[in-house]
Amino acid sequence: MKNTVSTESKQNRQAKGFYRGNIAVIASSSATRSFGTGIISTYVSLYFVSIGGDPISLGLMTSIASVVQCFVLFLGGFISDHYGRRRIMVLAAFYSVLFPVLYAIIQDWRIFIASTIIAAFGAVSSPASHAIVADSIPPERRTTGIASLQVVSSLPVIFAPLIGGWLIKTYGLIDGFRLASVYTAVTALASALIIFFFLKETMLNRVGRKPRLLSNDVLRDFTKRLRQLPSSLRTLLISYALVVFANGLVGQYYILYATRIIGLTELDWGIIVSLQFLLANILRIPGGWVSDKIGKRKVMAISVLTCAPCTIIFVLSQSFLQAAIAALLLITTGIYYAPAHEALQADLTPKAVRGRVTALWDIGNAISVALGTLMGGYLFQTVNPATPFYLFTAIELVAAFLIMGAVREPSEKEA
């Protein structure tokens, strides 16, 4: 018995060592990757339209990519829980290097759509990534830990939109975007190498045989697990899907509205996005600390309620200053929701099924993005550019009341 306890204690100490190391590895890799992605992500909508696309095609592209993610996320959750987290994260990291290279040479909007859809298969690692983070942070500090990780990961992104905007201003939209894509490919490769050399597996003790992916046993087990989820967790997943749907309505169209309706330049919008990232990093850790102290559910409800009217303020803007104030209000009110949700979801989910529940969460989000971006593009192009932003407010209010009415924090948090 004494030897068993000693062995378990040693394994726990080793695991905690891995976890601390993993958080540093994920932070470094994510920071490197997000910096490169941030250089081009702000301007994808404008670039897509400039090579022949339109808002409806933009929404359709994002929608199809999200539907593809639904299938690969189920696969990712299965792999994460039965085969481990690290392997799939490494493969997906190297896979993601290909697509910035393609963006640098693509000159047709239809090929751009095809490349973006194929790139969506890289989402297979998302459940493993979320699970490995949840595995690595003590339950009592989850929100603060997740918020801290997000801050460290996104610090370089503060400067990325400015660099992208400068490249576009200097070389033009087409050549500037393609040059930015080359930089993005280099950072994606560096991020993949960090994961490959330093990430450690957290599923140290996998019990039982590994089931076949497409067997009836796997599907029955997945369905059974879903039925057994706590009602608060199910409601939590639904409310997050609504928030993602609301953001999908407007996410791709902020820059189009800013440049077409308000009259801002690409660099003007890059400055605003950089200020958003800066403010997010200032507020995220204090918000996580408050969430751990006063309750994640309260913070989530307050965040969604106060964020809801901000898009209306944005569409009423008529100058750079007014648009900047509206965009910063969106961050000031909305930044606390995601870390609190992820932490509360981890509190409610047993470790043994965390990968699959995270996959379910990601699948719900992918469906919400698919529907939201498609509807947002249609409303933006055929009804009125402001309509998606008004609908955002209504959906956010529904999500807030759902959180307040049906979500409860657990008396005992899952490890």
Image (spheres, rainbow, N blue to C red):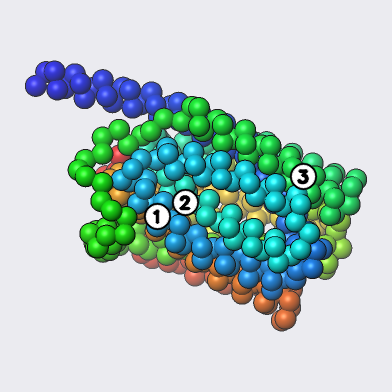
For residue 280, which quarter of the picture?
top right
Q: Secondary structure at mark 3?
A: helix
**Mark earlier in primary sequence (2, 1):** 1
Q: CA distance from mark 3 to mark 1?
A: 32 Å
| Residue 176 in the image, given as x and y percentages of width and height | 83, 48
Instruction: Specify the label residue 147 is tagged with.
Output: none
| Residue 67 in the image, given as x and y percentages of width and height | 51, 66
Residues at circles 3 and 1 in contact by the CB criterion of under 8 Å: no
Residue 168 appears left or right of 180? right
Q: CA distance from mark 2 to mark 3?
A: 25 Å
Farthest left residue in view: 1
Residue 210 in view here: yes
Residue that badge 2 annotates? 124
Q: CA distance from mark 2 to mark 1?
A: 7 Å
- Picture residue at 44% right of the left edge, 56% below the top: 73
**Mark earlier in primary sequence (3, 1):** 1
Category of crowding for the residue at label 2, using alpha-carbon neighbours closer than 10 angstroms: few (below 14), some (14–19), many (at least 20): many
Instruction: Specify the label residue 180 is tagged with.
Output: 3
Q: Secondary structure at mark 2?
A: helix
- Picture residue at 69% right of the left edge, 73% below the top: 56
Quadrant in which the N terminus appears: top left
Farthest bottom residue in view: 383
| Residue 42 in the image, given as x and y percentages of width and height | 72, 52
- Picture residue at 54% right of the left edge, 41% below the top: 93
Residue that badge 1 annotates? 75
Amino acid, disc 3: Ala
Residues at circles 2 and 1 in contact by the CB criterion of under 8 Å: yes
Please state which of residues 41 and 414 is positioned toward the viewer in this rendering.
Answer: 41
